[in-house]
Image: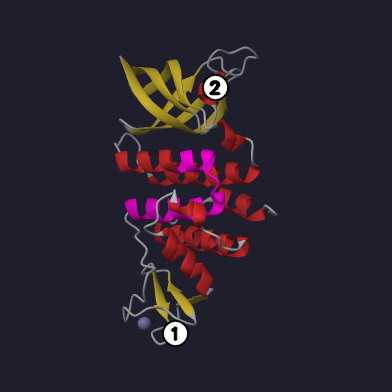
Amino acid sequence: MEEKLKAVVLRAVDYKDNDKILTLFSLENGVVSAAIRGVKKANAKLKFAAQPFCFCEYVLSKKGDRRSVVSADIIESFYPIREDIVRFYAGAVALEYVNAFVQEEMESEEAFLLLLSFLRALCYSSASPRALLVKFLIEALSLSGYELSVHYCIKCRKSVINRAFFDFDAGGAVCEDCREGADVEINPATLSLLSAADGASFDDITSFDFPLMIERKAIKLLSYYALVKAGVTLKSVNDLLLLEK
Ligand SMILES: [Zn+2]
């Protein structure tokens, strides 16, 4: 049986001498795995189709649970993401997120379109890759059922002014008057970034001008939130946080 899927490559792992196993995120069928044969040979025709970030239309053959790539037509390579180390690791966090949170063989159109919009912005817009990632993570977490509440205090519903705190269990900002023992103090500027990114479009992020330190803190907070709520460690976040500029 053959099937046609529009999909982004999340992961490509070496298999046997010349093959790879791809983890694909498809519009039609969520996350699926497929073998791609011979792609490690020097002049392999389908090399492009085994690169993370690459968006292709794949024709897969399916025997039982096993899929293998028959052919692929490139839709968008997102190549510029691989030319810049900050974009690359910001993108890698998103691919890792999808791989961890989106279920196999389950259509997730909204998550798919979110990933594509993020990759396009990461590739072609002048916005900060880290700020784009903050926006991606907020929206992706919300689609996974872990919505954040960052526009006001989740306990008294008033604006959070002066000192800001975060309740990781409830996923929301807390003001100084309502803070309790387990709430963690955060930089008020970190909360401003989260609040600005929540509800902004990827285009809007172009006008953001938050210091690098604040972007890092926001990404750290969101990845810690993913760990607390879902037990998922996004390893690429560490690679991104280690980058100097
Ligand atoms: Zn309050």
Looking at the picture, does residue 118 appear above or below residue 181? above
**Residue kind at label 2, given as amino acid type:** Phe
Q: Residue at x 32, y 81 (%)?
A: 156
In the rendered image, residue 138, in percent from the top left (x then y), is placed at 41, 56
In the rendered image, residue 3, in percent from the top left (x then y), is placed at 32, 19
In the rendered image, residue 73, in percent from the top left (x then y), is placed at 44, 18
Q: Is residue 108 visible?
A: no
Chief secondary structure of the magenta portion: helix
**Residue kind at label 1, given as amino acid type:** Glu
Q: Quadrant of ligand 1?
A: bottom left
Residue ID for mark 1:
176
* Residue labelled 1 has its Cβ within 8 Å of some atom of ligand 1: yes
Lateral position of residue 229 relative to residue 237, left or right: left
Which corner quadrant of the image does residue 180 belong to?
Answer: bottom left
Residue ID for mark 2:
48
Lateral position of residue 134 relative to residue 105, left or right: right
